[in-house]
Amino acid sequence: MKKREKIIIAVSIIVTAVAGILNYLQLNVILSFVVSAGALALLAKMVGDATEQLGSRFGPAATGILQSALGNLPEFFVAIFALKAGLNKVVQAALIGSILGNSLLVLGLAIFLGGLKNGTQRFSSEPPKMMATLMILALAGLAIPTVTHIFHTPGSTHINQMDIFLAIVLLIIFIASLFVSLKGDTALVSPPPESEAPHAVWPLAVTIIVLTVAGVAAGFVSDWFVNALKPAMQLLNINDTFAGLVIVAIAGNAIENVVGVQLAYKNQSDYAMSVIMNSSLQVALGLFPLLVLLSFFLGGSILSFVLAPMLLVSLALGVIVSAFIVFDGESIWLEGLALIGLYLLIAAAFWWG
């Protein structure tokens, strides 16, 4: 384990302890909110480093799936606690914000910084094309309850049943996509050249211990983060949608923010695309449907697929534009800058609610 990685673990432990103390003492809501968000980001980095070590024993597809799954753990914990606290609008916006954050902001930063350092970056186009196509299909599925509700069709009186049925369908498609990525056509899982593949340097036992400790700690910090979120929103005059779309989404997706950009900067484009796009796909086809189903049993607010029209339009823009970027199997820094610009425009549109 490198010195830098040991420092990150030490700082993560300290910041997590401080976040726990602030939550227990309840002295300053804003400070508790900021420190908890920082602790989430640091724990996400720990999980990211450990997952990269574990995933590097496999190919890009398995690495991307593994990193994205564990990378979504903090967001899953935050969503569970937020739903129990009745913040269903924040959770819904955070899930859409997670997809947009990965499809536009993180992908844009990866392409922009990777392109500035390495020039035109080329990657195997088949896995991103498959994931982009599935994202477009997921978008179509998510649009149906919203359109049903807006136009007051007969199905609008049965939104809960429609949400449950759609959740089950999306989860089945998600499981099938995992099978194809890991066991299907070799064109979808072919590894990059050996020189581009990250190598494992941590002992397996250390990797598992770091993953376990960071995952458990992320569960506690997520609870503290949500405890400070609602009063902090009121003090800072931040609306539910912006808080979920930007603040919670970025804090909950710190792993992809760090790992995906880091891989692209190292010119490991296949791995970067796999991690970033897998994260968006897992949220749309896995995390969102799972949380919809769980919300009926948590005892808090019910999470629905019915989106505000502006959220649906923003999601459509993010999914379609990012698909166009990755379909040709190469990228330049200007495309990354354009993606970042679109994300900032969408975020600004929600600042006022």
Image (cartoon, rainbow, N blue to C red):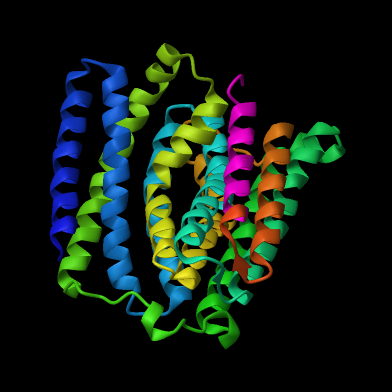
Please report the residue visible at 55 percent of the width from the left and 40 percent of the height from the top.
97
311 falls in the magenta region: no
Indicate whether 262 appears above or below 310. Answer: below
Q: Quadrant of the N terminus?
A: bottom left
- Residue 316 at x, y percent in the picture: 72, 47
Residue in the image at 42% along x and 50% along y:
257
Q: Please give the count of numbered marks on the rendered protein.
A: 0
Q: Which residues are magenta?
A: 335-353
181 relative to 47 in the view: left or right: right
- Residue nearest the viewer, comparing 189 with 168: 189
For residue 323, side relative to residue 57 (left or right) = right
Q: Quadrant of residue 148?
A: top right
Residue 185 seen from this side: no
Task: Indicate the position of residue 34 as horizontal and vertical percent values.
Answer: 31, 28
The spot of residue 24 in percent (x, y) is 18, 24
Pick the quarter of the image with the C terminus: top right
Kindly report the secondary structure that dominates the magenta region of the rendered protein: helix
Q: Note whether residue 146 is visible.
A: yes
- Residue depicted at x 51% and y 46%: 291
User: Picture quarter containing residue 205?
Assistant: bottom left
Camera-nearest residue between 230 and 317:
317
The picture places residue 139, in percent across and down from the top left corner, at 70, 52
Is 345 a magenta residue? yes
Residue occupying the far bottom of the picture: 186
- Residue at the spot 47% in from the left edge and 63% down from the top edge: 275
Left or right placement of residue 332 versus residue 249 in this view: right
| Above or below, 329 relative to 214 | below
Instruction: Using the image as rendered, state which of residue 188 and residue 112 is in the foreground.
Output: 112
User: Which one is nearer the viewer's eye here, 273 or 140?
Assistant: 273
Vertically, is 47 above or below 178?
Answer: above
- Report the side of 41 relative to 130 (left or right): left
